[in-house]
Image: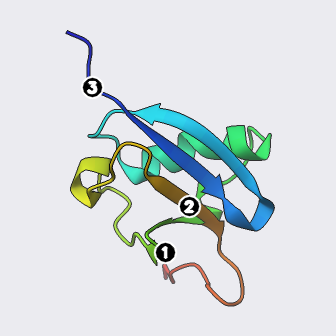
Amino acid sequence: MAEETLKVRVIVPDLWRERKMEFAPNTSVAAIKQAALPKLLGDDDVDPSAYYIEYFEKEVLDESRTLAELGVPEGGVISIRAYDLDHPAPFKG
């Protein structure tokens, strides 16, 4: 039996980019960000740590959480946004 997948919309709203993608429910949002950014931005050298994930317009602070843990349904929307002055990256020092 094939593993179940969810079709989700992954968007970079600030750039008006969108792609429908399929992931297993146990896929982490970090893995989604890593897989989707090069496709959405057309750049294989993009740094995923410069971006954060939103689901229902709230930042997902723990990117190890999975689609299933977040309750993302078929056709759900995952947003990827760049850190900027209004939303700086978490301090790691």
Residue in the picture at 28% in, 39% down: 25
Q: Amino acid at mark 3?
A: Glu
- Give the residue number, with chain letter if any, for mark 3: 4
- x then y, percent, for residue 63: 38, 60
Residue in the picture at 65% in, 47% down: 37
Residue in the picture at 51% in, 83% down: 91
Where disc 1 sits, the SS reads loop
- Give the residue number, with chain letter if any, for mark 1: 57
- x then y, percent, for residue 67: 32, 49
Position above or below: 21 against 77: above
Left or right position of 87 against 92: right
| Residue 79 numbered mark, or none | 2
Kindly report the distance in space between the C-alpha atoms of the residues bearing marks 1 and 2: 8 Å
Report if the CB atoms under discs 1 and 2 are less than 8 Å apart. yes
Position above or below: 93 against 20: below
Left or right position of 68 against 59: left
